[in-house]
Image (cartoon, rainbow, N blue to C red):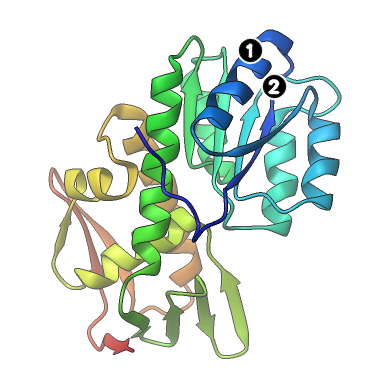
């Protein structure tokens, strides 16, 4: 399985894993698949590396010394809302998985896992990012808001809210299906690839976030359609294209 490269450049992965043997195996595997990969054994060293280098992808173990993966991801998100993040963990508690998605993680893999599974998940995220960039829609104008799709920004007057990749993908899908039902399973398979329980709960988290972003304009509403999905109510939505 080959992975999409960015132009002619190799993508750079920041890998943080405190299990030395697993870390080395993962690094060797993704390098064999055409990536540049830097490995760090704790969250503090990994975060310092992120500050100094340009990375296109982060793979973070949750339980690490000095700085855990959730803390590291939170700090990364204050600097960069776009870089994809996959969490690795031995934990399988629903609360921990939801916490990872709330922070802004793009995926979550529970140990033990196969190398092929990690590769598939990396590839799926990169396809979503690449596909999003190819769309012709420049902006949606809904109520008092302008949703700038390429910049992943929600603008209301002078107030600008930077959206995460998942927030942007979900709002884009809602706007594309504005005033009609967006089926839950369709949204899950389009954005998360899989409609399993954890991805469904993750989507609920992002729906809640979008409602908070849009609540200042009462003419816009995201409503639940029981047993089917969601509907974005925006009567005067206008689409701006290239």
Q: Which residue is mark 2?
A: 17
Residue 198 vertical placement versus 187 (above, below): above
Front: mark 1 or 2:
1
Quick one: label 2, few (<14), some, or many (20+) residues within 10 Å? Answer: many
Q: Give the tally of numbered discs.
A: 2
Front-most of residues 55 and 226 = 55
* Residue drawn at point x = 41 percent, y = 48 percent: 4
x then y, percent, for residue 161: 58, 72
The CA distance from mark 1 to mark 2 is 7 Å
Q: Marks 1 and 2: CB-CB under 8 Å?
A: yes
x then y, percent, for residue 57: 59, 44
Q: Looking at the rendering, in which quadrant would you find the C terminus?
A: bottom left
x then y, percent, for residue 42: 80, 25
**Element class at badge 2:** loop
Dot label at residue 121: none
User: Looking at the image, is mark 1 or mark 2 earlier in the sequence?
Assistant: 2
Dot label at residue 22: 1
Residue 112 vertical placement versus 117 (above, below): above
* Residue drawn at point x = 67 percent, y = 52 percent: 77
x then y, percent, for residue 48: 85, 42
């Amino acid at each position: 399985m080959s992975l999409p490269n960015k132009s002619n450049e190799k993508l750079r992965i920041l890998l943080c894993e405190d299990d030395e043997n697993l870390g080395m195996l993962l690094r060797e595997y993704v390098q064999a698949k055409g990536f540049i990969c830097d490995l760090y054994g704790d969250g503090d060293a990994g975060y310092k590396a992120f500050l100094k280098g340009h990375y296109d992808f982060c793979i973070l173990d949750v339980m690490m010394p000095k700085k855990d993966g959730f803390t590291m991801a939170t700090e990364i998100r204050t600097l960069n809302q776009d870089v994809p993040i996959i969490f690795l963990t031995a934990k399988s508690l629903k609360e921990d998985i939801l916490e990872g998605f709330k922070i802004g993680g793009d995926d979550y893999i529970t140990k033990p896992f196969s190398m092929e599974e990690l590769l598939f998940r990396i590839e799926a995220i990169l396809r979503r990012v690449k596909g999003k960039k190819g769309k012709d829609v420049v902006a949606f104008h809904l109520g008092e808001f302008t949703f700038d799709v390429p910049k992943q920004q929600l603008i209301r007057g002078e107030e600008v809210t930077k959206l995460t990749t998942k927030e942007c993908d979900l709002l884009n899908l809602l706007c594309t299906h504005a005033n009609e039902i967006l089926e839950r399973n369709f949204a899950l398979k389009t954005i998360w690839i899989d409609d399993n329980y954890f991805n469904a709960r993750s989507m609920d988290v992002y729906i809640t976030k979008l409602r908070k972003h849009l609540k200042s304009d009462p003419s816009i509403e995201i409503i639940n359609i029981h047993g089917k999905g969601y509907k974005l109510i925006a009567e005067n939505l206008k689409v701006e294209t290239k």
